[in-house]
Image (tube, helix red, strand yellow):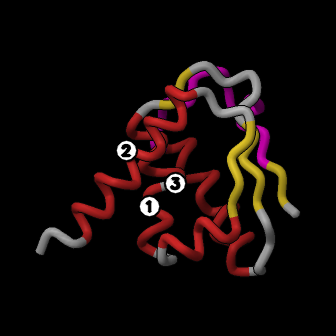
Amino acid sequence: MIHITFSHTGRQLSTRVAGAALRKKIIDGIEKQEKIVFDFSGVDIVSNSFADECFAKLMLHFDLPVVKEHTTFKNASPFIKAVIANSFKERLQAMYAH
């Protein structure tokens, strides 16, 4: 099991650079069939760009059911959950818009 504590990155997760770095760890974990826990304790804000880069762009590598099977969210506020859910929705719409 891989445990990612986002507060190590900061209380406010806002940059695409930070999101991309974490996404690489997540992809490696899913490819190794690991269960990944995303722990948001101590995190106040997640920006749309961070959520897209870190989470939604996983859709470029895996189907949504695969991502859901290997990941669990812990201690995410309703605001953080909404931002992440919205990033998945927007990414999926962009991918299937053609």
Residue 5 lies in the magenta stretch: yes
Q: Which residue matches tag 2?
A: 86
74 relative to 60, above or below: above
Q: Label 3 near label 1: C-beta < 8 Å?
A: yes
Which mark identifies residue 55? 3
Question: How far, Cα to Cα, is label 2 from label 3?
Answer: 11 Å
Question: Badge 3: how crowded within 10 Å, few (<14), some, or many (20+)?
Answer: many
Mark toward the viewer: 1 or 2: 2
Q: Which residue is mark 1?
A: 57
Q: Where in the figure is residue 59, as x and y percent of width and height?
A: 44, 69
Q: Is residue 2 above or below residue 67?
A: above
Looking at the rendering, the stretch of residues picked out in magenta corresponds to: 4-16
Circle 1 Cα neighbour tier, 10 Å, few/some/many (<14 / 14–19 / ≥20): some
* 5 sits left or right of 96 in the view: right
Residue 23 x/y as whole percent: 59, 58
Residue depicted at x 51% and y 44%: 17
